[in-house]
Image: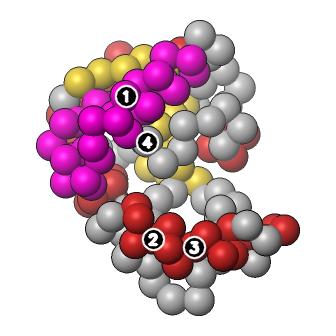
Amino acid sequence: MADLVWLHEGALRRSHPVFAAAEHGAPAVFIWDDARLAASHVGLKRRLFIYETLAELAGEMALEIHAGTAEELLPRLAAAKQASRILMPASPDPVMLASFGAVRRALPDLDLDLVEDTPFVTLTSQPDLGRFFRYWNKAKKGAMRPHGG
């Protein structure tokens, strides 16, 4: 079984549990989808940060960056890499989850797994994910405590 790791901007670190869940040395891909980034309200400075982080990760591991949509690119990438399973870091972002669902529909015969991570902070209510500032206003008190509680 060959694995392919599908990274997104919410999980750009080598220590993410998705890499432990994937077979050793599994390649990783990031799909640069301008429409999805815009739908997630990702601005120019955040996009630059994402790109710089990806460039740094690409120097440490097998990581490819592709432009387009995940539902059109991942079927080709999975076939080219002979992947039988795609692993993606779990995300609360509804736009990212919709993209994951579209890929699942495009690849019905392939295993697609979401890999959970330890949350940055535990909130008592559903966060407003429309803008980071609104999320951060609710999360910062808990995030600054030991263990994010």
Question: Would you say 89 lies left or right of 22 here?
Answer: left
Q: Residue at x 44, y 78 (%)?
A: 127
Dot 4, how many residues are within 10 Å of its Cα: few (below 14), some (14-19), or many (20+)? many
Question: Would you say 59 lies left or right of 55 here?
Answer: right
Q: Residue at x 51, y 57 (%)?
A: 90
Quadrant of res 26: top right
The residue singled out by tag 3 in the image is 139
Q: Nearer the viewer, residue 64 or 45?
A: 45
The residue singled out by tag 4 in the image is 9
Quadrant of res 143: bottom right
Mark nearer the N terminus (1 vs 3): 1
Is the Cβ of the residue at disc 1 closer than 8 Å to that at disc 3?
A: no
The residue singled out by tag 1 in the image is 48
Residue 76 point in image, percent of width and height: 26, 24
Say above or below: 9 vs 2: below
Dot label at residue 135 = 2
Is the Cβ of the residue at disc 4 closer than 8 Å to that at disc 3?
A: no
Q: Residue at x 62, y 16 (%)?
A: 61
Please state the extent of the stretch shown in magenta in the rendering. Answer: 31-57
